[in-house]
Amino acid sequence: MRDFLIRVFYFYYNGFRSMTVGRKLWMIILVKLFFMFVILKIFFFPDLLKKNFSTDRERSDYVIESLTQIK
Amino acid sequence: MLQNFDMSLVDWSRGQFALTAMYHWLFVPLTLGLSFIVAIMETIYVKTGNEAWKKITKFWMTIFGINFAIGVATGIILEFEFGTNWSKYSWFVGDIFGAPLAIEGILAFFMESTFIAVMFFGWEKVSKKFHLASSWLTAIGSNLSALWILIANAWMQNPKGMHFNPDTARNEMVNFFDVALSPTAINKFLHTVSQAYVLAALVVLAISAWFLLKNRDLLFAKRSIVVGSVFGLIGILLTIYTGDGSAQQVFKTQPMKFASMEALYEGQDHAPLVAFGITGSQDENNPGNYSFPVRIEIPGMLSFLSSHDANTFVPGIKDLINGNKEHNILSFAEKEERGSVAIRTLKEMKEARDADPEKYKELRAKFEDPQWMKDYFAYFGYGYYKGESPAELLPNVALTFYSFHLMVILGFFFLLVLLLALIWGVKDRIAGKKWFLWVLVWMAPLAYVASELGWITAEVGRQPWVIQDLMPNVTAVSNISATTVQITFWLFALTFTILAIAELKIMFKQIKLGPKDGGH
């Protein structure tokens, strides 16, 4: 099992080391993921219902109230 | 009623979602199609042992890798938007989206972390057959990933297999197979992936044609054209077949979208299909009624497309607004009345929950009564439009009409181009036809245009519904400031434009380098 894991590690390690255009692509992926999950998600895209209400009951009540606001 | 909603917020939220979805879709179809093309090329290499095919496979695999890397996770932004901009919608859809999206996440994770790694790192390190299997599994995995999100989209167009829980305001899945295997979902998936195959094939043809025009790597280019055109032809025939299936489903479940696709105002038996048309002005007193200064029709064809019977009655926009007793079509006014009864019942039930248990029980029972659900709750969303102009319940008819017609025209043009590419490719006469090679180069951008037009038809045509007949976009948006949405709109526009430019730059550089030995 240990040998297998070491082989898997070196498979990825050597794969990444021998990349050419792939290195640039990995940089783009990492910058993109940082931008999406750290900047966008935290500062611009909170889960509103999760953030504003602590229980599902409160969330349900809020949504029902919103959906039934008709004159 | 609509004055209760901030329409600027609704418009910016819709615009933002459209922008991110359309940019996301720039990356997806090439991944879906090119993954199979690469697998096919590698299969030929493994079968023949010819090293030239290995070189060809590796070149297209690199193009696939660039597109995959730039596009990966761009769809996550749409999920962020669900939670922030469309939180009421996210709540309302309940667990319908949860299961498909979870399966997609698991599939994508396993596929990306294992098989793609073997594809790119595994040359000479694993056996040829194992490498080939990884390429096929990557292709199948990426296509299956698309399946789940398309099932979710199909449910929004034709909600099935769920029960609305009035205590939680959430839809609960009662039959997974009704959701996953609804005819809308099956047609949507097959139509979407097959047109992605066409797009990928046309990109392969365009790049290969460029090599031929440059008089470079001729064997590589010719072989790529033959594989691409065979794959593209299969794709376009499947696209046409599933497009026909999709049209029948739209006719059954979204008649207003169907009428808008043809800008059909007056319903009729033996309805004609507009083969070519230019819309004029819209009658101000009759929303959806456009004049047609130019119109070439095929008699009975629209009726035939709706149900494979040229005598079928196809309701027009007018029939759907005013109703048509002869054909059992309810008017907007009737649907609005029924919808407002459903909304009022939900409101009174909630108010009675703690104050009057008997009344609560009585009202709650209605949501368990299949007949009441069919007669009233099925029109829930219409209740918000009571007293409003019928125009509020219409999609942008002209945009839907043009998107649909241009998509169809391009689709048949692709069929012709792919057929010619195959014939001249097999006869080895393609390199001498310079004009045709330039046509092929232009097929790449046109394929993206057709692909996006398909989504515009599907998504603009179903407006104002986020969930057909149940939830309009005005009630789906969160109560946030329109300014915040504007800021993120421009942020996304900038980010995605940078990504698209990066993709094109890296891709063009790799294309110029051409097929070569070595790693990716």
Image (tube, rainbow, N blue to C red):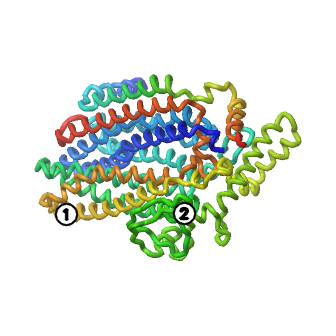
Q: Name the residue at 71% across, 41% down.
A: A68
Q: Which residue is mark 1?
A: B424
Residue beneath the point at 23% across and 55% down: B440
- Please indicate whether residue B74 sits to the left or right of residue B441 in the image: right
Q: Does B239 sit above or below residue B218?
A: below
Name the kind of residue labelled 1 in the image: Trp
Picture quadrant of residue B358:
top right
Crowd class of label 1 (few under 14; some 14 to 19; many from 20; radius 10 Å): some
Q: Position of residue B150 (x, y in %)?
A: 50, 48
B419 on left or right of B452: left
Q: Secondary structure at mark 1?
A: helix
Query: Which chain letter goes with mark 2?
Result: B
In x, y percent, where is residue B499? 33, 34
* Residue B251 numbered mark, or none: 2
| x and y percentages locating residue B219 in the rendered image | 15, 52
Q: Left or right of B127: which side holds B467?
A: right
